[in-house]
Image (tube, rainbow, N blue to C red):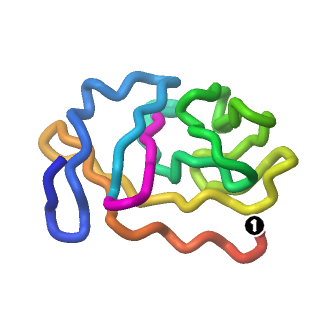
Amino acid sequence: MSGNGDYIEVMPEELVEEGEMYPFDLGDEQLMLARVDGKIHALHGICTHEYAELWDGDIEDDTVWCPLHSSGFNVETGTATNMPAVVPLPVYEVKVEDGKVFVSTKPIKNDPDDR
């Protein structure tokens, strides 16, 4: 990964397959990429309910499912869609340039109504 202003380069776009999740580090944070309906999303990779690596779970439609207690999170908004998690995941802006995926170094602010 290399830096590009307020974005970091994560991986080539062609390697991000539909319905798959790819973990990566952003400083001390563990994030992941997921491609859903052709769009690449970046979100925090650790469940907000209890420590579990979400990339070890499943992705179905627009929801990532935690492998530990089956909490669901919307890949677009980070909203917790299924208990026991209630706190949304931080999500990050993604841009693709010259066939490379870049992720913002700062999360998008979650809507307070999602908490």
Instruction: Give the camera-side residue of 88 and 94.
Output: 88
In this rendering, the answer to whether 90 lies above or below 10 is: below
Instruction: Give the camera-side residue of 31 and 64.
Output: 31
Can you name the residue that lies furthest to the right here?
Answer: 83
Q: Quadrant of residue 82?
A: top right
Does the magenta-highlighted stretch encompass residue 33?
A: yes
Residue 30 screen position, x and y as percent: 44, 50
The residue at which mark 1 appears reads as 114
x 59%, y 38%: residue: 54
Question: Number of marks in the image?
Answer: 1
**103 relative to 92 in the view: left or right:** left
x 79%, y 48%: residue: 81
x 63%, y 28%: residue: 57
Residue 22 screen position, x and y as percent: 41, 33
Look at the image and tell me in which quarter the C terminus lies.
bottom right
Under tag 1, what secondary structure?
helix
Q: Which residues are magenta?
A: 27-34
Mark 1 surroundings: few (<14), some (14-19) or many (≥20) residues within 10 A: some
**81 relative to 40 in the view: left or right:** right
x 74%, y 41%: residue: 72
**8 relative to 43 in the view: left or right:** left
In this rendering, the answer to whether 55 lies above or below 91 is: above
Q: Label 1 amino acid?
A: Asp
State the predominant SS element of the stretch in magenta. Answer: strand
Instruction: Give the camera-side residue of 113 and 57.
Output: 57
Residue 8 screen position, x and y as percent: 23, 56
